[in-house]
Image (cartoon, helix red, strand yellow):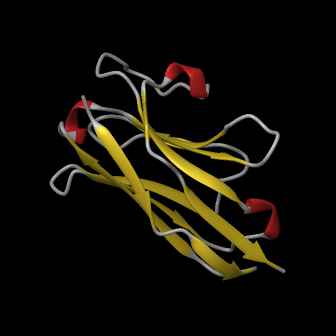
Amino acid sequence: QVQLVESGGGLVQAGGSLRLSCTASGDTLTNYPIGWFRQTPGQEREFVQGIRRSGGRIWDSDVAKGRFTISKDNSKNAAYLQMNNLKPGDTAIYYCAAGRPTWDTIFRRARDYDYWGQGTQVTVSS
C-alpha cells in the first residue's frame, strides 16, 4: 500500500505563495488519483483539489479556483499543490490523500479516500 508524506507548509504573509509536496512510497502514484484536503480545528476535512491517476483533468473547488493548482509528477512519485495569493482564511492543516486505482472520477468526500499523509500546517498572516 502507498504511504504519503506532505511537506512545504509554513508561515506566509497574505498574498504570498507556497508549494506543498506529497511524496509517495510503497507504491507508485501512477496507480492513484490524488486529492488535497484541508482542515481547521473543529471542522471536517474540506476538499481543495483533485487530479486523476494519469494527471491531466483537475477537479476544482471554490476555495481553490483561480489561486491553487494541483499537479502530479508520476516520474517523481509526487503530487503538488501550488498555492498563490494566499489569504488568512487558507490557514489550515493540508493533507494529501490517495484514492482508489479503480476511480474514473475524483470524489470530494474525505471518507472516500483510503490513504492519507500526516498533514502539513499552513499559516497565513494578515
Could you tell me residue 70's position as x and y percent? 46, 53
Residue 106 against residue 4 in the figure, above or below? above
Residue 80 against residue 84 in the figure, above or below? above
**Which of the image's four quarters has the C terminus?**
bottom right
Could you tell me residue 23's position as x and y percent? 31, 54
Residue 49 against residue 88 in the figure, above or below? above
In the shown orientation, is residue 72 left or right of residue 8?
left
In the shown orientation, is residue 26 left or right of residue 55?
left
Count of marks placed on residues: 0
In the shown orientation, is residue 24 left or right of residue 9?
left
**Which of the image's four quarters has the N terminus?**
top left
Could you tell me residue 61's position as x and y percent? 66, 43
Residue at (75% x, 79% y) in the render: 14
Residue 28 versus residue 118: which sits nearer the camera? Answer: 118
Could you tell me residue 41's position as x and y percent? 79, 47
Residue 10 against residue 111 in the figure, above or below? below
Residue at (54% x, 73% y) in the render: 18
In the shown orientation, is residue 26 left or right of residue 114?
left
